[in-house]
Image (cartoon, rainbow, N blue to C red):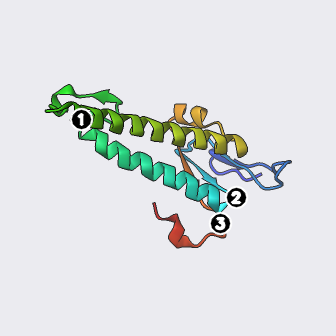
Amino acid sequence: MLNNNNTSSLDETNKENDHPIIQRRDIRSVILILDDVVEYNRVKELGDLVMYRSKLISYYGFDIKTGKWNTSQSPVTQTDAQMEGIKSDIERYNRAVADYKNYAEYLAKKYRIDINDQIQKGRSVMFRPPLSTPAYMWNE
């Protein structure tokens, strides 16, 4: 067992996966290294789509960080078609967020990570490709 100022320890092994588990009290992020590059590509694609859609609806007055609308920034539409376009953009954003969340939860269950618990503890959860993946694929 490794102990460094009583802040981290290395358990013998994880019985199911036969690899060491590092536990720390001062963790700020959880990095989940996926076994399959296809899983990584899918989660990255969904995350990129959420970011793209979030930029679009932020122009409509939605603050991504707080989840609140600033109606003074909302555009004044001239036609019903413009209003339908805005509604459609918001629906696509909500769908993209739901798809990302569902896939992230699927991966978390597969790799036995409680994402909601980690977020409540103030930790971010990051996904990474398999270690055998070329470094250029790690760019986010």
Observer able to see residue 76: yes
Residue 94 as seen in the image, left or right of residue 13: left
- Residue 107: which disc? none
Spatial separation of the CA atoms under disc 2 and disc 3: 8 Å
- State which quadrant residue 90 falls in: top left
Q: Which residue is mark 1?
A: 81
- Front: mark 2 or 3: 2
Q: Label 3 is placed on what type of residue?
A: Leu
**Which residue of the protein is positioned furthest toward the right in this rendering?**
15
Q: Pointer 2: what residue?
A: 35
- Sooner in the amino-acid sequence: mark 1 or mark 3: 1
Residue at image point 50% right, 54% down:
45
Quick one: SS at disc 2?
loop
Lower position in the chain sequence, tag 2 or tag 1: 2
Residue drawn at point x = 53 percent, y = 31 percent: 120
Residue type, mark 1 in image: Ala
Looking at the picture, which amino acid does disc 2 mark? Asp
Q: Which percent across, then down, holds residue 27?
A: 56, 44
Which residue is under mark 3? Answer: 131
- Taking 38 as reference, is 14 above or below it? above
What residue is drawn where x is 65% and y is 45%? 107
Q: Nearer the viewer, mark 1 or mark 3?
A: 1
Q: 125 and 96: which one is in front?
A: 96
10 Å crowding of disc 2: few (<14), some (14-19), many (20+)? some
**Label located before the other in sequence (2 or 3):** 2
Relative image position of residue 83 (x, y in whole percent): 24, 32
Whole-angstrom CA distance, mark 1 to mark 3, is 48 Å
- How many numbered discs? 3
For the residue pair 24 and 6, the one nearer the viewer reads as: 24
